[in-house]
Image (cartoon, helix red, strand yellow):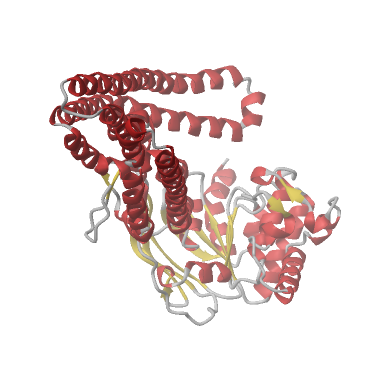
Amino acid sequence: MAVTKSAAVKLLGMEMPPALADALRLCRPHFVAAAAFSLLINILYLAPTIYMLQVYDRVVPTGGKTTLLFVTMALALALLAMTGLEMVRSRLLVRASERVDAVLAPRILEQMVASETPATAQAMRDFDTIRTTIGTPIVAAMFDAPWTPVFLLVAFMLHFWIGIMAIVSAALLIFLAWSNQKATQARMEVATTAMAAAQNTQQAAAMQGVAVRGLGMTGAMVERQLDSRRIALANMVDAQLVGSRLTATSKFFRIFVQSAALGLGALLAIAGYISAGAIIAASILLSRALQPIEGLIAGWSQLATARAAVHRLAHVLEGLSGQRAYTALPSPKGLMEVENAGVRGSEGRPILVGISFKAGPGKILGIIGPNGSGKSTLGRLLVGAIQPAIGTVRLDGARLTDWDPAELGRHIGFMPQEPSLFEGTIKENISRFARPATADDLRAVDEAVVAAATEAGVHEMILQLPEAYESRLGLMGAGLSLGQAQRIALARALYGAPKVLVLDEPNAFLDQAGEAALIGALARAKARGATVIVIAHRRSVVDASDELLVLDQGRPTMMGPSAAVVKRLAGPQAGKENAA
């Protein structure tokens, strides 16, 4: 393990991505302290060797019971100190893993929300694998491994041939470790990648459980998930079997070497080259010299899993940049400007092309068009959820990227096509999970929540729920009908009286009463001077719009006053009906 001031940081035998390297550098004091404790621990590990030399070379020949008592007490103190130091070292490594988590976890979660790809969905599990590995005994073994040469040197001090035996044994164990790595690394990487894919498939199937059951797809989906698991398990079991064989071999080898050291020591003692105490000391010394190497072999599958996690996580961490500083901008009036904006899909296919328009305060702009015309993508673009490949989106003259994202979210209310409610109370969902620090802040949040619900026309509906605003929703907003969830999502968009509202199909799941409440909410938002942009299909929302923008295949085809656009769209069809 090496942590340096340069850009390259190596851990687990591979170079870390820059973001992870920066987090590890913050843990330098923990790693330096762990290295210092490792020095003391390994010095104290010599105590049993010295004890055996004293017992067999001094106590037994002289019958010195007092000497035996004192050296035994000294051994006990040394071992107690060593145990305490090992506990502190383990605590340091765990604290280092916690610090890495505190630095990187929020940024990875932000990247997961921003990207919405399968790779980022797996990112947090990969990060947890790396974080957990940092605090495990295998990293402690990596700190102990550099001290193996010291024990080999002490072995030479006992006798030349004991030192040679120690070096040969260490070399053979290192060869076993290298063989273990070669034999298991590729299999473990394939296994962990396949298992990640299987977990993503399982999660998606669980989220769509109603559709799966309703369409009779349970058997097919189970088989599909099992196929992914079979690939993962086949490689994982193969790697574990190979690893277990090598681990057992290394254990056998270490025990054999420890016993062989007794035999070699006995031969040397018979020849008069070493004392009787050195026989036992040599066995203990060789066992300790080889212990870190055996520990690395035993934990190699965990290292391989962590390496694969680092490799996958690198793609996600590439998108992380340092915390950007933002200038506080004045509260906006709500003028939205889109200047020749374009958006491309993941494969480079254009989704939006040449989008230009303005939407001002106190007006309702409706965006209409056939399915797949890019309306929802435009909605995400207007709230800064995605960035344009070309062109610019501005709020009161400032690019959306110039706004602090948290500040921008307070000025823009967004309602996606799916309600997207979260586990928590109704109040928490409407308040966007605000965390008030004081009683006054809590009161202000409560007032803003009720005001948003009232403006959305959903206050009375919430009061009919068993616990009103404190009613708890399950995962993905479970506990409400789609229509109810959509009305709560509208209240969330209106929370804090934002200057801009972007609503994507806000009436897709509403009944007649819900749609009437929506039209009333649009009128109230317009009356208070908000800029309202609505993506819609239904005529009621179109009729409430002041202007309409028509999209077709990602391109704007028409924009103007609502009545004029509707008339132009209906003109050709009306002509056909008259001709008929």
The correct choice, above or below, for 118 with respect to 21 in the image is above
At x 73%, y 76%, the residue is 440
Question: From where the camera sits, is residue 123 visible?
Answer: no
Residue 90 to residue 182: above or below: below
In percent of width and height, residue 134 lies at: 40, 45
Classify residue 57 as left or right of residue 325: left
Residue situated in front as seen by the camera: 315 or 464: 315
| Foreground residue among 9 and 354 | 9
How far across and down, in percent of the image, does residue 244 sit?
37, 20
Q: Is residue 496 visible?
A: yes
Residue nearest the observer in this picture, 482 or 128:
128
At x 43%, y 21%, the residue is: 233
Q: Height in image: 329 above or below 88?
A: below
Q: Please report the residue visible at 44 percent of the width from the left and 49 percent of the height from the top.
A: 81
Q: Residue at x 40, y 19 (%)?
A: 237
Extreme-bottom residue of the structure: 330
Which quadrant of the rendered structure holds the C terminus? top right
Q: Position of residue 106 (x, y in %)?
A: 48, 57
Dividing the picture into quadrants, the one containing residue 156 is top left
User: Where residue 536 sits: x, y (%)?
Assistant: 59, 53
Which residue appears farthest toward the front when viewing the image? 62
**Residue 12, image quadrant:** top left
| Drawn side of residue 558 relative to residue 544, left or right | left
Residue closest to the eye, 157 or 473: 157
